[in-house]
Image (cartoon, coloured by chain):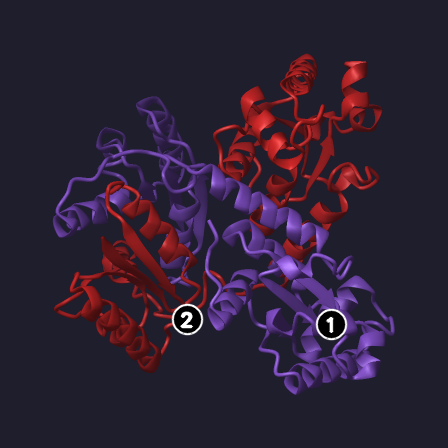
Chain colours: A red, B purple
Amino acid sequence: MKNVFFISDRTGITTEGLGNALLSQFESVDFQKEVIPFVDTIYKADQAIVRINNRYNKDSIKPIVLTSIINPTIRNKFKLPHVFHIDFFESFVPSLEAEIGISSSLTLGKSHGIIDEDKYYKRIEAIDFSLYNDDGMTVKDFDQADVILIGVSRVGKTPTCLYLAINYGIKAANYPLVENDLKQDKLPKALIAYHSKLFGLTIDVDRLHHIRTNRLPNSEYSSITTCTKEINTAEHLMRTYDIPYLNTSKKSIEEISVGIMHSINLTKKF
Amino acid sequence: MKNVFFISDRTGITTEGLGNALLSQFESVDFQKEVIPFVDTIYKADQAIVRINNRYNKDSIKPIVLTSIINPTIRNKFKLPHVFHIDFFESFVPSLEAEIGISSSLTLGKSHGIIDEDKYYKRIEAIDFSLYNDDGMTVKDFDQADVILIGVSRVGKTPTCLYLAINYGIKAANYPLVENDLKQDKLPKALIAYHSKLFGLTIDVDRLHHIRTNRLPNSEYSSITTCTKEINTAEHLMRTYDIPYLNTSKKSIEEISVGIMHSINLTKKF
């Protein structure tokens, strides 16, 4: 067992992200992780050190402390003999300074703060858009969409749309392919005008059966027969109409979102 | 001007996050950024290098290439004489190996992939919950909420609930304090039973006026008078009922979300 602290002068989101990616390379180790955000004063650093020391005094295991703290005086507080410490800024800023040829500004809050009004509105607008254009509730704003996701129920459309909106300011609508659409074996009328914006999501039968069973056990909706039929018809539709698509079965929301963006060249809007 | 490439064998989200945090320390430099995800084969590395070289051949400026690639053969492809290259794994894995005392597994896909069924369902359930419990549409499931955000219209409740659900699997409901609630100067009846789950969001008058004007210009809704009255009454309510709250004016969705979690000790559910 190893205690790990992710400590940041901001939200800690990036620190935790890189930290988790690094630690995931040591699968056999049981890491007890704790995130301490907003450590931007000596006082808060001292408070964090109390937490670290309490843990160390309890189990005598040298803790791993991964920090992203811009102010050297604050981050140096974590250089303690009983601590394994890495700071992500300290590790890279000097070599970047040398390469770029100017000194860093040592300022806080540039990466996750509101910097730009225009960017703020783009983000909020995209979130509102994804909420109003979820699940085929309306198609009247589809002309404003950056992408329209199609697929059977529970393939992952809604979480993906929300993720794209929140993290990339992308206006993502979604339209579910329901029984009636699938029966026709034709692209639903409402979508024809937006063919170039369509992106399909598909899924393995077993996985869909599993997800739907978790929602509505022992229903026709969740049966292997229904899942198979819906998926086959939906994929046939996507191939017939030359709509790019990806399989969500083994993918996280992050992977699906970035996969779509990469596939059709969408980029962050803010 | 400097060209920057964020290259990852997975989504690139963390690579871009840390990269942006580092580059934000050099405010005066105009960085032209490009993210290339899913570079997990030699072939894809070669394709990425073509993009890098094209840019270099055009402007003769040495590009900065920040990578997170676990496979050494693939990441070493980016060690080129005309490139400034840093790999985040390479920089830290060796010292972590020494500290932890075991070799890393050099395996892909541990940080943003679906690992665990239970975690997947927790996340999806939280997203569904936040959608069904948005904007006071219903209060019947408030007993299942991890947190219930209250505040005036356009203070940031919905984006925060969605962010908490998607990124932390936290079941966050929200309840808008509308004119009728505020007139009473009492906690809305529907919320009394859930007092311990309430968290308030507030905002500066100018900022709210600005946001509401962007939505409904020249309306009573967006007027300074209405904004002032609503904010004052809402804050008075939060103080009277001892509800923790924070001001969202200068904060990003990430900062608001982590601020709430930190303040009331909520942790990631998956």
**Crowding at mark 1 (Cα within 10 Å: few <14, some 14-19, many 20+):** many
Q: Do labels 2 and 1 share a chain?
A: no
Q: Residue B111: x percent and y percent?
A: 38, 42
Q: Residue A229: x percent and y percent?
A: 68, 15
Q: Tag 1: residue type?
A: Val
Task: Describe the element under mark 1 as helix, strand or loop.
Answer: loop
Q: Residue A242: x percent and y percent?
A: 66, 17
Of residues B74 and B82, the one drawn nearer to the viewer in this rendering: B74
**Crowding at mark 2 (Cα within 10 Å: few <14, some 14-19, many 20+):** some
Quadrant of res B89? top left
Distance in Å between CA atoms under marks 2 and 1: 26 Å
Of residues A93 and B174, the one drawn nearer to the viewer in this rendering: B174
Task: Describe the element under mark 2 as helix, strand or loop.
Answer: loop
| Residue A46 against residue A137 in the figure, above or below | below
CB atoms at circles 2 and 1 under 8 Å apart?
no
Quadrant of res B139? bottom right
Q: Name the residue under label 2.
A: A38
**Subunit under mark 1:** B
Q: Tag 2: residue type?
A: Phe
Give left or right: position of B267 versus A44. Answer: right
Give left or right: position of B13 versus B208. Answer: left
Q: Tell me which residue sits at (69%, 12%) in the image.
A: A240
**Subunit under mark 2:** A
Q: Tell me which residue sits at (61%, 42%) in the image.
A: A159
Q: Mark 1 points at which residue?
A: B152
| Residue A158 against residue A61 in the figure, above or below | above
Of residues A129 and A226, the one drawn nearer to the viewer in this rendering: A226
